[in-house]
Image (spheres, rainbow, N blue to C red):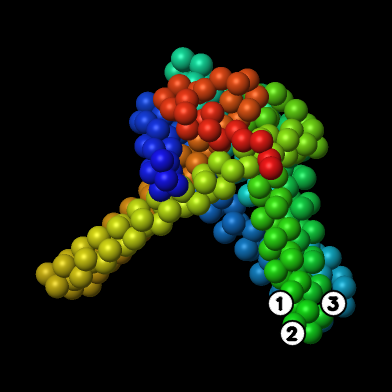
Amino acid sequence: MNVFSRSWQITKMSFRVINKDRELLAFALLSFVFSAIFSIAMIVPSVLSEIINQGQPVSELEVYQYIIIFATYFGLAFIATFFNVCVVYTAKIRFEGGDATFGESIRFAFSRIGLIIRWSLLSASVGLLLNVLERAVTSFGKVGEIVGRIIIGLMGAAWSIATIFVVPILVYDGLGPIDAVKKSMSAVKETWGENIVRSIGLGLMTFFAYVAVIAGGVGLTILLTNYFEIAGLITGLVIGGCLLLFTGLLFKVASTVFTTALFVYANEKIVASDYDPALIEGAFKSKK
């Protein structure tokens, strides 16, 4: 089975799980809404700091800005992690033959609130560190800045890969952030090949879906504009935007569900229901 076919099968299996537990999409939508509200709210103190601190020493201004940046990273990490915990818990119960309700998953996330806060603090700290490094490389000259940004980008990618199983670990094992990162790195070593296929494969499916949605949205907007002018243009843009949002949420949830299925096998050597054993077992290969 080639990479494309394998990825398409993985996507279909993940969609099958989502179809059984459609509240998974509600968690993703809530995460998006709360993140958007929080981001808008954080813009206010940022703008106020620029106004209030005009004429203040640069060092003092930067300290305040870094506090705002850290608070933003923490808030967004907390919101994303909280609702991802809901998604993973719902998938966990489904894989075990049960059917978690929306409220049950929310209550479980609250039961892990301490771990979610601690993980969000660690995630925000790493994000702030990368932000500081990115600002620092601007003083290295043109070439130095380019090389520095590449290195920082690789560091960020490595962190994302190393921590891919952290949320499932929070749900299944209830470990603290440091132990969760260590266990995630260990699981990544087992599933390295498939994780690359997952990121590329679901990414390809997402890309094709976006192309189809954009093409359809543009066509619909042009058609509506021809008949209804401004009203048609606005309607087409709104419909297209909603379809793009839905596509993004759908594939984000599918990715989280599949990551959970991989973790289940890495942790318990059990193939999650709704997934082909050959695909899951084939994800675990010894490093050469």
Q: Amino acid at mark 1?
A: Ile
Q: How many marks?
A: 3
Residue 53, compared with residue 236, is above or below; it is below
Q: Which mark is residue 58?
A: 3
Q: Quadrant of the C terminus?
A: top right
Please report the residue visible at 42 percent of the width from the left and 45 percent of the height from the top.
2
Marks 2, 3: nearer the viewer: 2
First of labels 1, 3 by sequence position: 3
Q: Is 22 on the left or on the right of 220, as rendered?
A: right
Marks 2,1: beta carbons within 8 A: yes
Please report the residue visible at 73 percent of the width from the left and 39 percent of the height from the top.
185
Q: Mark 3 packing: few (<14 Cα in 10 Å), some, or many (20+)?
A: few
Please identify the quarter of the rendering in which residue 78 is found.
top right
Q: Amino acid at mark 3?
A: Val
| Pick the front one: 35 or 274 | 274
Marks 2,3: beta carbons within 8 A: no
| Tag 1 residue | 146
| Pick the front one: 164 or 135 | 164
Q: Amino acid at mark 2?
A: Lys
